[in-house]
């Protein structure tokens, strides 16, 4: 028997008193013709949520705690069932946490007031199997997430950061469809994009050959580090490749990262920046065919001559030579870097105090302080960067980040207290 938990929680982990109609409909579909255990006291409140399920009522004592004997006996009687769901009593979340095989969590994308909280998911124990963002016409936004204890069996998780760059993100997604391997999941770390980005992702999803997880948060200004940390927790593999939603990868991009991965190291790549005119000119067909990486084609479209164009023609010995002789240090670059999940979790992810400008470098400096050193692949793993404005760049944010980075280097900081796990957790 597979024991599954049905739960709902806000971004701040608070369990709400009321449940969206969309969540109720999702739960009804999940439990159709299956068994759901709920407390007898809450039966009237919950019975309409599970119209096609076999509901088993279990008593709880006057203090509100689970009648452990009753529910344990019930589970013994149901041991031949394929899957049994538990729902409706916050006490059961903690009491049976170690016994759950699967968690179906509906995450509401806002913060609410309340005293009862859902536990923070431990990424070392739980693996996110799938995630589906729902954007209702009334403005409600929530994600239906499924956690399991086993890894996904894929080679890597690709994490793309984005915010209101729908056209560029679509081109980037086609770049991943053109990869020589599809043995990865793709996680869109969305820092509060409008609904048009959601609509585009839902439209293109069926046309792609790899699974997508759309990790979204409310727009409260530049919070890239926050959403990257949420994306890390959403990953389902042992190796993570990071890039941006405005960087189209060459067809061997993922394959190069997988080939070059090495324990005790992180990979440091770069990008080839295109002018805006060329960025707008590139089409889906240019990406799928690989024309947008052809120097002659790009020059005809308006790209100027530059030594940096060598990135686009570097393979084999030439790539090795340029990676070896370059004076550029192998830093963690958010547009093209990769590393092991265990190393990323050990540093506690990205520092959420940081704004635009060097937040990725600070993360890499903590990796270096931990003995995880960068490995240069800037001439091997290639992506082209689509030009856009940076309205979130300010003098204040740059200086704040410089101060944090200085402290990280001077004090040899390995783990930030402002990352995935907060000091208050």
Image (tube, grey):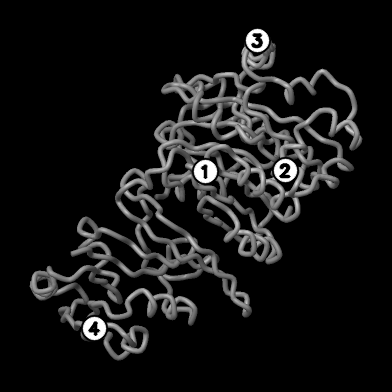
Q: Residues within 10 Å of mark 4 (few under 14, many from 20)?
A: some
- In the picture of the structure, the residue carrying the numbered disc 3 is 321
Label 2 close to label 1 by CB (< 8 Å)? no
Q: Nearer the viewer, mark 2 or mark 3?
A: 2
Label 2 close to label 3 by CB (< 8 Å)? no
Q: Secondary structure at mark 2?
A: helix
Q: Distance of mark 3 from mark 1, alpha carbons?
A: 28 Å
Instruction: Tell how many labels.
Output: 4
- In the picture of the structure, the residue carrying the numbered disc 2 is 287
Q: Distance of mark 4 from mark 3, alpha carbons?
A: 66 Å
On screen, 76 above or below 415?
below
Q: Nearer the viewer, residue 402 or 88?
A: 88
Q: Distance of mark 4 from mark 2, alpha carbons?
A: 51 Å
Q: Earlier in the sequence, mark 4 or mark 2?
A: 4
Q: Give residue 100's position: percent from left, percent from top.
A: 24, 60
Q: Give residue 305's position: percent from left, percent from top.
A: 89, 23
Q: Nearer the viewer, mark 3 or mark 1?
A: 1
Q: Tell me what residue is drawn at x 48 percent, y 45 percent.
A: 232
Which quadrant of the rendered structure holds the N terminus?
bottom left
- In the picture of the structure, the residue carrying the numbered disc 1 is 182
- In the picture of the structure, the residue carrying the numbered disc 4 is 54
């Amino acid at each position: 028997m597979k024991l599954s938990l049905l739960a709902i929680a806000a971004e701040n982990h608070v369990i709400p008193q009321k449940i969206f109609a969309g969540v109720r409909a999702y739960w009804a579909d999940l439990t159709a013709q299956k068994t759901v255990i709920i407390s007898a006291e809450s039966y009237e409140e919950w019975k309409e949520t599970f119209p096609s399920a076999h509901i088993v009522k279990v008593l709880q004592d006057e203090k509100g705690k689970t009648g452990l004997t009753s529910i344990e006996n019930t589970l013994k009687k149901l041991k031949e069932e394929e899957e049994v769901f538990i729902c409706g009593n916050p006490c059961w979340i903690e009491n049976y946490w170690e016994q759950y095989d699967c968690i179906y969590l509906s995450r509401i994308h806002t913060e609410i007031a309340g005293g009862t909280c859902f536990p923070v998911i431990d990424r070392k124990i739980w693996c996110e199997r799938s995630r589906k963002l729902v954007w209702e016409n009334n403005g409600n936004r929530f994600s239906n997430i499924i956690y399991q204890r086993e890894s996904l069996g894929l080679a890597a998780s690709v994490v793309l950061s984005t915010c209101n760059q729908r056209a560029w993100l679509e081109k980037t997604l086609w770049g991943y469809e053109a990869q020589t391997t599809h043995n990865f999941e793709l996680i869109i770390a969305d820092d509060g994009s409008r609904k048009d980005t959601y609509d585009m992702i839902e439209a293109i999803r069926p046309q792609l050959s790899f699974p997508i997880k759309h990790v979204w948060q409310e727009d409260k200004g530049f919070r890239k580090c926050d959403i990257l940390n949420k994306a890390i927790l959403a990953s389902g593999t042992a190796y993570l490749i990071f890039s941006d939603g405005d960087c189209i990868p060459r067809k061997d991009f993922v394959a190069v990262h997988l080939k070059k991965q090495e324990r005790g190291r992180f990979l440091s790549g770069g990008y080839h920046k295109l002018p805006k005119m060329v960025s707008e000119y590139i089409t889906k067909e240019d990406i799928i065919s690989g024309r947008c990486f052809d120097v002659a084609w790009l020059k005809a479209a308006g790209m100027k001559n530059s030594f940096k164009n060598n990135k686009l023609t570097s393979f084999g010995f030439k790539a090795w030579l340029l990676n070896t002789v370059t004076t550029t240090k192998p830093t963690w670059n958010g547009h093209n870097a990769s590393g092991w999940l265990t190393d990323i979790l050990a540093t506690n992810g990205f520092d959420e105090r940081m704004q635009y400008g060097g937040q990725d470098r600070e993360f890499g400096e903590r990796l270096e302080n931990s003995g995880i050193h960068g490995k240069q692949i800037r001439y091997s793993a290639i992506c082209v960067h689509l030009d856009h404005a940076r309205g979130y760049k300010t003098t204040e944010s740059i200086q704040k980040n410089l101060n944090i980075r200085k402290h990280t280097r001077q004090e040899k900081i390995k783990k930030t207290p402002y990352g995935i796990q907060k000091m208050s957790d």
